């Protein structure tokens, strides 16, 4: 959750066992669910007094949920003369308990919600303007790797696709987790494309762009292939 005026980001965790956002069975929907009538606007596009009363009544009937206390608060490092997008943190899920944060100065860290511990990560090679992120777990469990790719891909530009990859390091006392940031190749492009959607199946990442079709990236061989003119039937990541 972002507090724009103060450039403060707060990580909160909802307990879905205590806060039920949806009815779990068709019987509960039939018993409690209802469709609220749409609010009609007059010809001048302003709300009439009657519709205003309806809106207030509907708002009073909506059950409110108190926000849980923040697990951690954070703020991006300020620039001398910051722009609005430079005071932004991108937030991605590495796993159910591990959250990744990245700012516009390439800094990256993770927060473990179980241990309540912040862990510094390798810096990105370049800041990301509008990234999509896909997490791929390690075989046999573990934190896995996080792949970040710019939505707008430009041929010939470096560091548009990177991965934070976890590994295992052994010393004399115990094994420990290590991380590295790898630059990855782009799909074979002749012009700029805007990625509409991105998904992962096993070790393969698939991206789609309207008018260009779909491409797949094999995370083991680091190779791209064009798979067709079709596009994934959604927007964003899945």
Image (spheres, grey):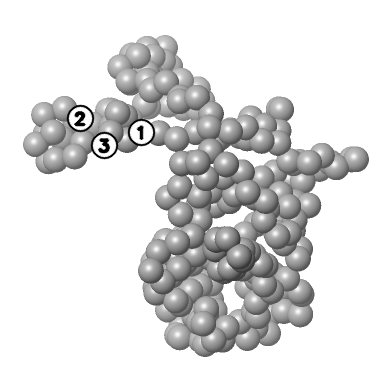
Residue drawn at (45%, 25%), measured in percent from left and top? 68
Residue 52 image label:
none
The spot of residue 88 in percent (x, y) is 70, 43
Vertically, is 167 above or below 52? below
Q: Given the current orientation, which residue lies at the most extreme right position?
A: 80
Measure the C-alpha gap from mark 2 to mark 3.
Answer: 12 Å
The tag earlier along the polypeptide, 1 or 3, is 1
The spot of residue 108 in percent (x, y) is 68, 53
Measure the C-alpha gap from mark 1 to mark 3.
Answer: 13 Å
Counting every numbered tag in the picture gives 3
Q: Nearer the viewer, mark 2 or mark 3?
A: 3
Q: Which quadrant holds residue 59?
A: top left
Q: Are marks 2 and 3 in contact (CB under 8 Å)?
A: no
Vertically, is 37 above or below 227? above
* Circle 1 Cα neighbour tier, 10 Å, few/some/many (<14 / 14–19 / ≥20): few
What residue is disc 1 on? 15
The tag earlier along the polypeptide, 2 or 3, is 3
Helix, strand or loop for disc 2: loop
Q: Along the line of sight, which residue is nearer the eye, 116 or 209?
A: 116
Q: Which quadrant holds residue 87?
A: top right
Q: Along the line of sight, which residue is nearer the eye, 235 or 210?
A: 235
Q: Given the current orientation, which residue lies at the most extreme front position?
A: 172
The quadrant of the picture occupied by the N terminus is: top right
What residue is disc 2 on? 34
Q: Nearer the viewer, mark 1 or mark 2?
A: 1
Residue drawn at (67%, 67%), measured in percent from left and top? 181
* Circle 3 Cα neighbour tier, 10 Å, few/some/many (<14 / 14–19 / ≥20): few
Helix, strand or loop for disc 1: loop
Q: Is residue 148 visible?
A: no
The tag earlier along the polypeptide, 1 or 2, is 1
């Amino acid at each position: 959750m972002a507090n724009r005026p103060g450039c403060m980001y707060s990580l909160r965790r909802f307990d879905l066992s205590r806060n039920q956002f949806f009815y779990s069975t068709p019987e509960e929907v039939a018993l409690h669910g209802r469709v609220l009538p749409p609010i009609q606007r007059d010809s001048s596009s302003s709300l009439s007094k009657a519709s205003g009363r309806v809106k207030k009544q509907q708002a009073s009937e909506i059950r409110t949920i108190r926000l849980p206390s923040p697990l951690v608060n954070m703020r991006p490092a300020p620039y001398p003369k910051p722009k609005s997008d430079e005071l932004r943190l991108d937030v991605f899920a590495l796993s159910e308990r591990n959250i990744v944060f990245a700012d516009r100065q390439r800094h990256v860290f993770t927060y473990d919600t179980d241990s309540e511990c912040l862990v510094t990560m390798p810096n990105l090679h370049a800041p990301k303007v509008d990234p999509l992120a896909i997490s791929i777990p390690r075989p046999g469990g573990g934190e896995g790797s996080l792949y970040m790719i710019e939505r707008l891909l430009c041929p010939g530009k470096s560091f548009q696709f990177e991965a934070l990859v976890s590994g295992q390091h052994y010393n004399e006392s115990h094994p420990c987790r290590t991380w590295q940031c790898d630059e990855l190749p782009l799909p074979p492009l002749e012009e700029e494309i805007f990625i509409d959607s991105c998904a992962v199946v096993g070790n393969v990442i698939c991206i789609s762009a309207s008018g260009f079709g779909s491409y797949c990236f094999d995370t083991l061989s680091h190779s791209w292939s064009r798979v067709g003119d079709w596009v994934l039937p959604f927007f964003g990541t899945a």
